[in-house]
Amino acid sequence: MTVTTSEKPYVVFGYGSLIFKPPPHVIDHVAGYLKGYVRRFAQKSHDHRGTPENPGRVVTLVHKEDWDAFSGSDLFPDEDVVWGVAYTIDPLYESEVREYLDYREKDGYTLEELDVYGVVEGKEVVLRHNAYCYVGRNDNPSFIGSEPIDSLAEHIWRSVGPSGRNKDYLYELSIAVKKLAPESHDSHLAALESRCRALDAQEVNPSQ
């Protein structure tokens, strides 16, 4: 058993696979959203949903202003926010969970502290201050940026890695996000899921 030395609660915000595969030793969790960020399949996955030779694609966060500056073909709707889950970790296991997450997110992700928002009694409030979040910044080697939606969907559909098929990651994430709140829509996830489902159908019925 590892004892933490932190004075504040260790809270981790999951916006990707952490939503449907939570970290260990969670003692509390709350659904919420980030403001000013874009969630996109803009990060190569060499170790989970792809291979070093054929990397898959997984989500990362990008500042909205940065995304708008270099992605004219995939603008971020102003009404979209990044929904996810803020997990509070048992203080007795903080060091253990930090090591686990650092290893799990080692492929190009950087730790940042972000406020997590929600709506309580009709008012927007900060649910968790300075939650830790793993962000694949656009200067890391695995960041690939914006790709045409159809080619991105096809790449996700055919990619496979040690953690399974890339499309299953997309499907699980899309379903999990929809369940977080009545308003937790993500236009990017919806567009990719629709295209990958169409490829599934085409594989089953090639003549259609």
Image (cartoon, rainbow, N blue to C red):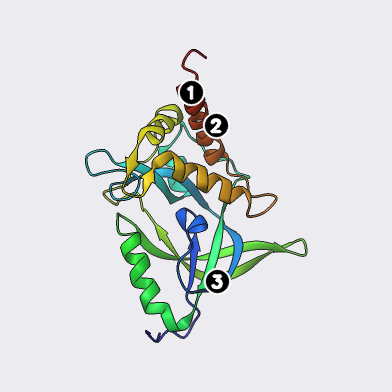
- Tag shown at residue 125: none
Q: Is residue 126 left or right of residue 167?
A: right
Q: Residue at x 44, y 27 (%)?
A: 150
Foreground of the two, 41 or 77: 41
Tell me: residue 177, above or below residue 155: below
For the residues labelled 2 and 1, the Cα–Cα distance comes to: 16 Å
- Tag shown at residue 194: 2
Residue that badge 1 annotates:
204
Task: Say whether disc 1 or disc 3 marks the residue closer to the N-terminus.
Answer: 3
Residue 64 visible from this viewpoint: no
Q: Is residue 35 left or right of residue 144?
A: right
Task: Say whether disc 2 or disc 1 marks the residue closer to the N-terminus.
Answer: 2
- Single out the residue that lies furthest toward the front: 204
* Residue 115 image-quadrant placement: bottom right
Disc 1 secondary structure class:
helix
Total labels drawn: 3
Residue that badge 3 annotates:
129
